[in-house]
Amino acid sequence: MPAAHAIEKLRAALACLPGVGPKSAQRMAYYLIERNQEGARGIASALLHALDLIQHCRRCNNLSESELCPLCTSPSRKHSQLCIVETPADLEAIEQTGSYKGCYFVLMGTISPLDGIGPDDLGVDRLLEVLEEFVIEEIILATNLTAEGETTAEYLVDLLAGKEVARDINITRIARGVPVGGELEYIDRNTVARAINERQRVEATGETRLSIYSDGKGNH
Ligand SMILES: [Zn+2]
């Protein structure tokens, strides 16, 4: 393949990264090939290594190198408490407060109709399996206080209200200490800790704002 084609292919590959447009992708491609071949080889091998090794933890759905991640197997965590977050970065933000000792479930996203992301695209099925398999007493909904995060939290409350497996689970939502529109990842530790500590019980309304997903299958 002529060099120009190889560069074009690399540029197109880099442009799949979030926030990287065609111009930045081109700059990166030239930089890696022309200025930093060692760095480029490092990225290539680290990527392949990660793809081979990393899977989803069977319990928390976070990225893990083993079937169960170290957090889920830790004897010092309270396994009956399940804090539901959107992303691994949100989990990290809560961990950094040091004030939460329960376990997690990572959805790996939020319901976002504009982006075509419905409940089926999140780890909701896996969440229900976790509730079947493990004894959970409290679910803390710690999705962000953005429109998508709120919709996702409301969806989960309504979904769980209809499930026998969740009948005795106390469902709480992080407190509004987090500013409206706030994302845990970008909020200071004290505020995140307060939001967790001052969480409040929530009840299903049966009226998830996103009625198009009300059958739980994302069917319109
Ligand atoms: Zn885990």
Image (cartoon, rainbow, N blue to C red):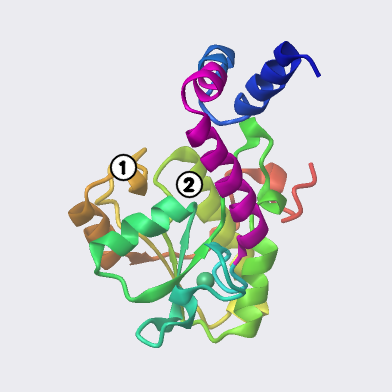
Residue holding disc 1: 186
The residue carrying pointer 1 sits among few (fewer than 14), some (14 to 19) or many (20 or more) residues within 10 Å by Cα, namely few
Kind of element beneath mark 1: helix
Residue 198: which quarter of the image?
bottom left
| Magenta residues, start to end | 28-56
Residue holding disc 2: 149
Q: Is residue 109 left or right of residue 83?
A: right
Q: Is residue 42 magenta?
A: yes
Q: Main secondary structure of the magenta part?
A: helix
Disc 2 C-beta below 8 A from ligand 1? no
Q: Is residue 88 magenta?
A: no
For the residue pair 219 and 66, the one nearer the viewer reads as 66
The residue furthest left is 190
Residue under the point 60% across and 39% down: 112
Disc 1 C-beta below 8 A from ligand 1? no
CA separation, marks 1 and 2?
15 Å
